[in-house]
Image (cartoon, grey):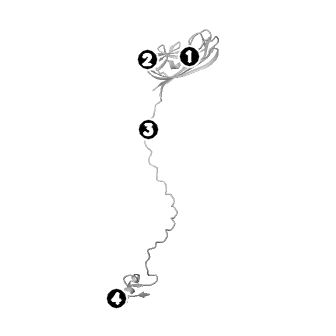
């Protein structure tokens, strides 16, 4: 030990009572009692702990109101084979029972109440003499231009069409064909669905 301030008794008491201060207040230095400003390297990070348990599931919310069908009514019509004449529709089925939005009007007509309708229609058409066959849908005797389907002049063709039609007042819908002695229409059908 190298103590350079031990000239009096107070310094000796300092050394005895506070050995950690030997190199400072007491004025003494000895190996092992110095101070250092060097910080050692950081140790490695420990492993991540296990995931804690999942919390309890919250209460189930209230059930929403029951939805309603997008269709208000639907009707399915067919017509037997016909040559040189309009098809005669037959009501095969309708839903719901007793609905009054889509009703059979006789011959090739259907009564519709005001509203929006999706329609699908079709026929297998045969031409034997070069006349072009057509099928279409009319509302109050006005052909819906987007519903016209045309077959072939010689031979057979399967014609089908779809339409979305909005009717502002109660109306008469008809299933139309081009009539000629050489034109035969088979497997005729008309499906009409009214939207809510």
- Whichever of callouts 4 and 1 sits on the residue coming sooner in the sequence is 4
Dot 4: element: helix
Q: In which quarter of the image is residue 82?
A: top right
Q: How far apart are the alpha carbons under marks 1 and 3?
A: 45 Å
In this view of the protein, which residue sits in the foreground, 33 or 73? Answer: 33
Where's residue 126, x and y in %? 63, 15
In this view of the protein, which residue sits in the foreground, 35 or 87? Answer: 35
Closest to the camera, between mark 1 and mark 3, is: 1
Q: Residue at x 37, y 86 (%)?
A: 14
Q: How far apart are the alpha carbons under marks 4 and 3?
A: 89 Å
Q: How far apart are the alpha carbons under marks 4 and 1?
A: 125 Å
Q: Circle 1 sits on which residue?
A: 135
Closest to the camera, between mark 4 and mark 1, is: 4
Closest to the camera, between mark 2 and mark 4, is: 4
In this view of the protein, which residue sits in the foreground, 155 or 101? Answer: 155
CB of mark 4 within 8 Å of CB of mark 1? Answer: no
Where's residue 54, x and y in %? 48, 54
Crowding at dot 1, Cα within 10 Å, few <14 / some 14-19 / many 20+, comes out as many
Dot 1: element: strand
- Whichever of callouts 2 and 3 sits on the residue coming sooner in the sequence is 3
In this view of the protein, which residue sits in the foreground, 94 or 186? Answer: 186
Residue 24 against residue 98 in the figure, above or below: below
- Whichever of callouts 1 and 2 sits on the residue coming sooner in the sequence is 1
Where's residue 55, x and y in %? 46, 53
Label at residue 170: 2
CB of mark 1 within 8 Å of CB of mark 2? Answer: no
- Whichever of callouts 2 and 4 sits on the residue coming sooner in the sequence is 4
Q: Circle 4 sits on which residue?
A: 10
Q: Circle 3 sits on which residue?
A: 64
């Amino acid at each position: 030990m190298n103590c350079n301030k031990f000239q009096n008794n107070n310094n000796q008491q300092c050394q005895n009572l506070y050995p950690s201060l030997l190199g400072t207040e007491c004025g003494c230095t000895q190996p092992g009692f110095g101070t250092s400003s060097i910080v050692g390297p950081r140790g490695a990070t420990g492993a991540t702990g296990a995931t804690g348990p999942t919390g309890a599931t919250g209460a189930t919310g209230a059930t929403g109101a029951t939805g309603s069908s997008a269709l208000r009514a639907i009707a399915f019509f067919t017509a037997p084979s016909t040559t040189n004449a309009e098809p005669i529709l037959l009501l095969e089925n309708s839903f719901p029972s007793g609905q009054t939005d889509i009703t059979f009007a006789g011959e090739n007509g259907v009564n519709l109440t005001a509203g929006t309708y999706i329609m699908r229609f079709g026929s297998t058409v045969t031409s034997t003499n070069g006349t072009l066959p057509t099928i279409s849908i009319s509302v109050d005797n006005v052909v819906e231009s987007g519903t016209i389907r045309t077959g072939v002049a010689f031979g057979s063709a399967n014609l089908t069409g779809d339409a979305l039609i909005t009717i502002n007042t109660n109306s008469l819908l008809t299933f139309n064909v081009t009539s000629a002695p050489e034109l035969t229409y088979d497997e005729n059908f008309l499906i009409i669905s009214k939207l809510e």
